[in-house]
Amino acid sequence: MKYVSVTDPFDHEIPAADPRGEAPVAASRRRSRRLAAPTNPLLEQAFPSWARPPKQPAVGADAGFEAAFRAGAGLALLDQILRLDPPFAGALRQRLALGAATARAAQARHREDSSALRDAEHLAPIGARTSSAGRVHRLWRLFARGPTPLEDSTLRIAADLLGLSDAASFEGFADALRDLAADAETPLAAAAGAMKLLAGAPPTGADVSSAGDKPHVEIFALWLADLALVRRLGWDAPVPLLATTITHPSPRRGPSGKRPRPADADWARAMAGAYAMAARDALGLAGELSRRSQALLAAQPKLRAKSAGRVIELLLGDDAISPAAAARATKLSDRASRRLFDRLVELGAARELSGRPNFRLYGL
């Protein structure tokens, strides 16, 4: 399969397909080149109405086909953005990680909202223990930072964060998951296949039965589906998608309005509908972050601090950053770091996210 861009200026930057038939993987770029990447015209266009998920899911014989079509269309558009590794890619993944954790915390009836999860991650002392919802946030944050191989160690870290089992072995399961992702006809098939594999042939010693009755097992399944999806798409880092929308009212089924679960007979349709919504939302967020990142990069010549470039990289790579963390990363004094962020806000290049006079957090 060969990827062909509809925008000629970017055709030369999209790699050809792997000769083994796997999806192409975008080549890595040096940071200096990545920060200077051109704006993708797709980000300036409205999301096509024909690809937009309906307010009410389709019913009947064609419901699954329609959901899969819309999911494929949205993922293809998102693919065109992410393959260029835009400067804001890290912030996009981490903001989606926050959205995934917030949605799952609400579903599990945890008290933390997005602000509380953000504070727990960025203001707590380094190495501090966190809550159950905080560990879910940390799971998606950890694997949204960069390339995540489908290996035993990757799955082991995720299981540990979710407290599934200390005695689980993922070695054979990881091999099966890699084969599944490589052989699946479509990315959606890879995602669905990963969840079926977890239910039918779970890792040795892992307590992953009855996913619908165990919130952390279901979280692991949703995370695993995203991992298989992006592997089949050829993206260089996981993008939290399914968990951000699977609890949305639209994918719910029947007059009872029950939320879909992996064990349901119509799970494939619900999953495709959720991916369609997630891709649409991610594209909207990417457009917003693209505009904000351009403003941030344009402000750099107006900054006098020697470490301003590094602070800009931190803002582009994460959902939020505290002045104290920026000071540690750049060797600025705490006062100089706070003044730099105040200047960025004054220039309209960054936003203060906490709404507090103290212990502030900043981001795109």
Image (tube, rainbow, N blue to C red):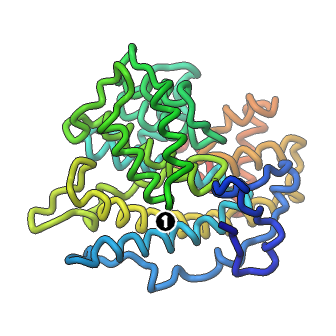
Q: Residue at x 71, y 76 (%)?
A: 5
The kind of secondary structure element at disc 1 is: helix
Above or below 360: residue 243:
below
Res. 350 visible in picture? no
Above or below 210: residue 227:
below
Residue 189 lies, in percent from the top left, at 43, 57
Above or below 364: residue 318:
above
Q: Residue at x 65, y 41 (%)?
A: 147
Q: Quick one: 265 or 285, which is closer to the camera?
A: 265
Residue indicated by mark 1? 279
- In the image as oriented, which residue stretches furthest toward the left? 256
Residue 95 lies, in percent from the top left, at 53, 51
For the image, the number of numbered tags is 1
Q: Quick one: 308 or 52, which is closer to the camera?
A: 52
Residue 23 lies, in percent from the top left, at 64, 57
Res. 217 visible in picture? yes
- In the image as oriented, which residue stretches furthest toward the bottom? 49
Q: Quick one: 355 or 265, which is closer to the camera?
A: 265
Query: Which quadrant holds the N terminus?
Result: bottom right
Q: Residue at x 45, y 31 (%)?
A: 173
Query: Which quadrant holds the C terminus?
Result: bottom right
